[in-house]
Image (cartoon, rainbow, N blue to C red):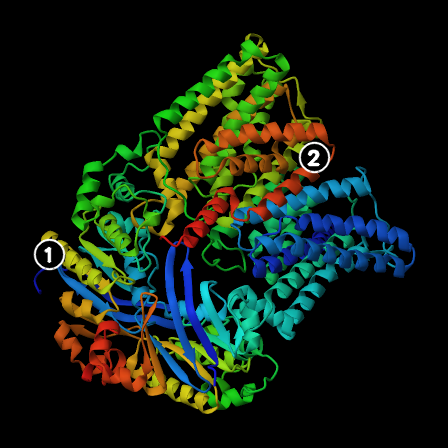
């Protein structure tokens, strides 16, 4: 990847909470079209890391550079305007709006039209919204309220919303949590397809190792706030250190 | 000068003690039950009234009679608190925040009328404390020794609370329940007992605070709301749930008041305001408060889809409008006056609905903007000699500007914090209208606010009102369905997601707050001209509750709801006022009954019933 | 002899979604049962329903022969069931000693009697931090404290919701030893677990739950021997 400027570049990122170092000295790059997985035990600092990249938390120190410009400490809404789409561990959508309206809202905001107090919002960006929904396979349910959708479908809606600003980087925190095994594989295959087609860099955290090893181009392993491994899936899988703290050395079930 | 500063300092600290007692009680109750007890000012008032009676009966001259009376009053208020908890609050711990606030407000109304019936409308003066009648000389000025005693009470109670919470099992359980009440139950602690005892204890603190004021100030029927507003400011500044913060803030506000009155009597409130601003900018959750755990979902949990009116609904709306327009042909002038008011209140309710429904911001002080609209019109007429037309045009801007200023603070908070702050601002606006006699005429109001000659006939003024209100309601409706309205709902549904797609949630809410205030101001200005006069009651808390009830009655979820609710509510309450002089009690009782019978709200109750029915259906 | 805990046909729902469908399970006296299954399969909900934290919508739960479904959590705790939630939930502002005192109940017949000193012997790490606030402890220490706090109620049955979740392997091993020690004291234990390795080292029996239904109920040895079953439900 050397020679090509990475989409996201993180250097020496650190954050403490009341003396506890949640994240320290984390550095990595994500290239366009690359699927990068961030894994590690609970409490290793994955969510803290994510929230610093998405603007929900401000880092104590370190650099976060998106396409050559710093976004460290920027607000979530500024980071969105710079071309970052985000999905959350617990899906965050607008429950009182329909699936289509959720995506329309993102498109309206992206076009800078959210302050219009008079025009009917439902007529805005209909075609673009439906195109995004078709891309994630949610067009048939476009008119349903997000508040009553199945969890797996909500994850798809979130993906469509996250794609509404034509992002260069997608941040996905546990994108398949709470989904059935087949759904997980399907969703991540979809993400991988979109990422490759549109040269979007994707950084995701994941608990399901099947998903990680099937879809990640590269894997980062975080433990107690530090990166302990960074490499292709097969290398990480056989890394002794990673097996010790996370994957396990002697999995009785797998050995049988 | 030095002695004056010292005296005022001591004065401020003396009044801080009572404020602290009430605020700490409120904070402790909130910590465990998650209910902001609006009736805490009423308990304070009851403590003062009970002390008047008991001290009088026991003999104010003997120390035993006086102190016995004070302590017994506090104890009785504690018992009253227990009754309130067992009879009312226990039923609504699962209810949405807004309904809980409303229920405690029902108690406020009931207590007002009970106090009126028992102690009468005249102010009551308490006796001096035996043994504390003398003065102490401090730097050549006489300082009442009772004040010094009060100053000592604050830290004394603070220490007592510290001991109770750090050194007793009850205190440990309360602290544990404040953090995770479900877990405390799973460890074998009977939460009901804990909640009841906490509420009784907090109530007794408020009662003691009221009783101790006896030698200092007259006991009045206004004490409840003026106290609760001040306590809310203290709690917001100190940090909800922090007893130490409550003390710090009480002293700060108390001393500020004392100095403000000395230096610039009219500007006292502004001073308090500025301090609050600084604190909220630097520490949004108060001096010693922490970010509250995720606030509970809105009034009815998940809001249904909002869809534009069907052709049928539009037709029905048009028919209603035509019917109203035909009214002057059919009804008497007296009825026309009532109809004019109804139309005005429909706009008032619709303006609050924009905040509460799509905005998810509960306001317990929306009357401030209605009242400021009315005063804006009246002041323009009285002081600028303006005729109706420019006055009508200018008045809403007064309300809108207040909305911009107050809203800036309010949108920084959410949930109950915000509700508390809106109430505090409304009380500040009311106090200004009440006390700034030179400008507003105080309690006597401003008279002679009549329409221009052409609009004097009742039918003409009715048409003018109908045209302005209908147009305003339609514009508000359009706003709800516009991108801005969607952004507002987005911020309510999921602030996290809204910010992550580039929406500045706070600014959108601020805009909605200001628009709602402006629209309420239009209603208020029309109301001033329809009545021909304005009074401080226009911006008093009960009027704010009127607006809340109109919105809730009609349904927070629907856009046409508040208009329907306004007609239903005003119609009912007008009848109620005619039927009984104790309409506050009746209204309060009705609110309490409604909330405890339908703790999830009417719509929520219906949805729960439907869920149960579906669950019991074996075919599914 | 009748089982200590007997769950029969248990249903539970959140709003419209049915989470548990006719769960039947029993825990014998002195037995350790591992309830296995994926995230969202219904393990935690089963525990919460036993504890009275989620109201069952159907079925019965008996503890020592007595119906406990529909009772409040504090009553169930007083009958002798101790609950350790998966997200730990220590009282972060309270010290270790204060956390223990919240859980304290009078001694109970037929159950080991715990004092802070006995617990410090079981969890030596805690002894050194009696006055430390719960919030200033590591995840593993918090997990130990939650268990110790629950033991202060002298329970006969312990519900452990994912005790190994998110803990470093070293701590997980210590946790396994603790559970075996508690079993040695005569305690009955129902634990939910995703980690088969861990469950296999402490449990006598295992049950597998998937989409709110029990798919397997047998000895730990039988589960270990059945590779197809594990592959189908445990994704390990």
Position of residue B605 relative to residue B329, above or below, is below
Which sits in the foreground, A72 or A93? A93
Chain containing mark 2 = B
| Res. A228 image quadrant | bottom left
The x, y position of residue B246, in whole percent, is 61, 58
Residue positioned most to the front: B619
Residue A247 % position (x, y): 23, 78
What residue do we see at 12% from left, 56% from top? A193
Q: 10 Å neighbourhood of mark 1: few (<14), some, or many (≥20)?
A: some
Could you tell me which residue is drawn at 23 percent across and 69 percent down? A208
For mark 1, give the secondary structure. helix
On screen, B326 above or below B600? Answer: above
Q: Please tell me whether residue C136 is drawn above or below residue C185 in the rendered image.
A: above
**Nearer to the camera, B339 or B469:** B339
Q: Quadrant of residue B193?
A: bottom right
Look at 17% across and 42% down and name the residue there: A131
Res. B13 visible in picture: no
The x and y percentages for residue A72 are 28, 58
**Which residue shows up at 55% across the image and 38% down it?**
B548
Report whether B499 appears left or right of B206.
Answer: left
Q: Residue under mark 1: which chain is it in? A: A
Report the disc number at residue B583.
2
Q: CA distance from mark 2 to mark 1?
A: 70 Å
**Can you identify the residue that label 1 sits on?**
A196
In the rendering, which numbered label is found on residue B160? none
Depth check, front residue: C101 or C30: C30
Q: Is residue A51 above or below residue C180?
A: above
Tag nearer the camera, 2 or 1? 2
Q: Is residue B76 left or right of residue A103?
A: right
Percent position of residue A173, x then y: 27, 61
* Quadrant showing the C terminus of chain C: bottom left
């Amino acid at each position: 990847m050397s020679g090509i400027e990475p989409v996201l570049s993180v250097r020496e990122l650190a954050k403490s909470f009341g003396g506890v170092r949640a994240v320290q000295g984390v550095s990595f790059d994500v290239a366009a079209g690359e699927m990068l997985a961030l894994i590690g035990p609970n409490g290793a600092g994955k969510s803290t890391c994510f929230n610093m990249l998405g603007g929900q938390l401000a880092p104590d120190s370190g650099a976060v550079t998106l396409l050559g410009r710093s976004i460290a400490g920027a607000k979530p809404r500024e980071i969105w305007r710079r071309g970052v789409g985000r999905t959350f561990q617990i899906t965050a959508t607008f429950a009182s709006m329909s699936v289509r309206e959720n995506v329309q809202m993102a498109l309206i905001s992206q076009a800078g039209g959210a302050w219009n107090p008079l025009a009917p919002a439902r007529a805005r960006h209909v075609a673009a919204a439906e195109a995004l929904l078709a891309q994630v396979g949610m067009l048939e349910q476009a008119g349903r309220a997000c508040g009553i959708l199945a969890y797996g479908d909500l994850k798809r809606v979130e993906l469509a919303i996250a794609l509404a600003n034509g992002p260069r980087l997608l941040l996905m925190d546990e994108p398949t949590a709470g989904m059935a095994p087949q759904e997980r594989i399907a969703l991540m295959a979809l993400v991988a397809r979109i990422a490759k087609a549109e040269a979007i860099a994707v950084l995701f955290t994941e608990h399901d190792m099947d998903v990680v090893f099937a879809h990640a181009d590269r894997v980062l392993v975080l433990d107690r706030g530090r990166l302990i491994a960074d490499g292709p899936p097969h290398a990480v899988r056989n890394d002794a250190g990673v097996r010790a703290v996370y994957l396990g050395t002697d999995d009785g079930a797998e050995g049988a | 000068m030095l002695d004056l500063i010292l005296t005022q300092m001591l004065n401020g600290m003396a009044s801080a003690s009572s404020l602290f007692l009430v605020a700490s009680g409120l904070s402790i109750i909130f910590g465990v039950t998650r209910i902001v007890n609006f009736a805490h000012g009423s308990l304070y008032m009851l403590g003062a009234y009970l002390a008047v009676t008991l001290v009088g009966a026991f003999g104010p001259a003997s120390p035993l009679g006086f102190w016995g009376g004070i302590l017994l009053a506090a104890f009785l208020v504690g018992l009253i608190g227990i009754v309130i908890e067992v009879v009312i609050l226990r039923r609504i711990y699962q209810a949405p925040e807004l309904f809980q606030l409303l229920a405690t407000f029902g108690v406020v109304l009931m207590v007002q009328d009970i106090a009126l019936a028992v102690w009468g409308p005249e102010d009551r003066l308490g006796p001096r404390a035996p043994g504390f009648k003398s003065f102490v000389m401090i730097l050549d000025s006489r300082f009442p020794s009772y004040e010094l005693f009060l100053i000592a009470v604050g830290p004394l109670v603070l220490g007592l609370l510290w001991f109770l919470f750090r050194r007793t099992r009850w205190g440990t359980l309360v602290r544990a329940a404040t953090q995770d009440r479900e877990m405390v139950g799973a460890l074998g602690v009977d939460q009901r007992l804990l909640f009841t005892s906490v509420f009784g204890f907090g109530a007794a603190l408020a009662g003691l605070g009221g009783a101790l004021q006896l030698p200092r100030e007259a006991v009045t029927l206004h004490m409840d709301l003026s106290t609760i507003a001040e306590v809310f400011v203290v709690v917001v500044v100190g940090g909800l749930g922090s007893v130490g913060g409550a003390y710090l803030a009480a002293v700060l506000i108390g001393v500020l008041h004392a100095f403000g009155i000395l230096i610039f009597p009219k500007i006292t409130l502004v001073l308090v305001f500025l301090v609050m601003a600084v604190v909220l900018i630097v520490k949004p959750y108060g001096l010693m408060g922490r970010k509250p755990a995720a606030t509970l979902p809105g009034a009815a949990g998940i809001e249904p889809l909002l869809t534009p009116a069907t052709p049928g609904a539009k037709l029905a709306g048009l028919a209603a409008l035509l019917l109203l327009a035909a009214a002057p042909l059919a009804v008497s002038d007296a009825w026309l006056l009532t109809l004019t008011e109804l139309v005005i209140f429909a706009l008032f309710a619709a303006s609050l609905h924009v905040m509460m429904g799509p905005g998810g911001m509960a306001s317990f002080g929306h009357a401030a903007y209605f009242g400021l609209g009315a005063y804006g019109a009246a002041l323009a007429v009285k002081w600028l000699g303006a005729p109706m037309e420019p006055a009508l045009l200018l008045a809403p801007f007064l309300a809108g500007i207040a909305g911009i200023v107050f809203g800036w603070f309010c949108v920084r908070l959410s949930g109950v914090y915000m509700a508390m702050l809106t109430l505090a601002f409304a009380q500040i606006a009311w106090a200004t209208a009440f006390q700034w006699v030179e400008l507003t005429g105080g309690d006597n109001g401003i008279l002679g606010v009549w329409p221009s000659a052409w609009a004097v006939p009742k039918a003409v003024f009715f048409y003018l009102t109908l045209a302005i209100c209908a147009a305003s309601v339609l514009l508000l409706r359009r706003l709800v369905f516009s991108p801005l309205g969607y952004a507002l709902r987005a911020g309510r549904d999921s602030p996290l997601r809204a910010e992550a797609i580039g929406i500045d949630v706070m600014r959108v809410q601020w805009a909605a707050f200001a628009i709602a205030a402006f629209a309420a101001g239009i209603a208020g200005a029309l109301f001033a001209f329809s009545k021909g006069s304005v009074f401080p009651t226009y911006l008093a808390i009960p009027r704010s509750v009127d607006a809340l009830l109109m919105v809730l009655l009609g349904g927070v979820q629907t856009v046409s709801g508040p208009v329907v609710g306004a007609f239903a509510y005003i119609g009912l309450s007008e009848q109620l006022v005619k039927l009984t002089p104790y309409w506050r009690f009746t209204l309060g009782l009705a609110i309490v009954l409604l909330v405890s019978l339908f703790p999830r709200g009417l719509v929520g109750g219906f949805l729960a019933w439907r869920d149960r029915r579906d669950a019991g259906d074996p075919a599914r | 002899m009748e089982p200590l805990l007997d769950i029969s046909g248990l249903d539970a729902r959140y709003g419209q979604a049915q989470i548990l469908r006719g769960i039947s399970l029993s825990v014998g006296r002195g037995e350790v049962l591992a309830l296995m299954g994926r995230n969202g399969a219904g393990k935690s909900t089963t525990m919460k329903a036993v504890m009275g934290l989620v109201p069952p919508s159907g079925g019965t739960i008996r503890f020592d022969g007595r119906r406990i479904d529909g009772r409040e959590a504090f009553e169930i705790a007083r009958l002798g069931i101790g609950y350790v939630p998966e997200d730990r939930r220590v009282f972060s502002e309270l010290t270790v000693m204060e956390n223990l005192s919240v859980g304290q109940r009078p001694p109970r017949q037929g159950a080991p009697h715990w004092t802070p000193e006995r617990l410090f012997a079981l969890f030596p790490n805690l002894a050194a931090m009696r006055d430390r606030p719960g919030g200033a402890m590591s995840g593993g220490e918090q997990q130990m404290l939650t268990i110790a706090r629950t033991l202060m109620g002298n329970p006969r049955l312990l519900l452990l919701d994912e005790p190994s979740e998110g803990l470093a392997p070293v701590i997980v091993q210590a946790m396994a030893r603790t559970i075996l020690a508690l079993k040695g004291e005569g305690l009955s234990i129902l634990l939910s677990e995703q980690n088969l390795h861990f469950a296999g080292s402490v449990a006598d029996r295992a049950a597998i739950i998937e989409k709110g239904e029990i798919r397997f109920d047998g000895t730990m040895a039988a589960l270990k021997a059945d590779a197809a079953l594990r592959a189908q439900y445990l994704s390990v």
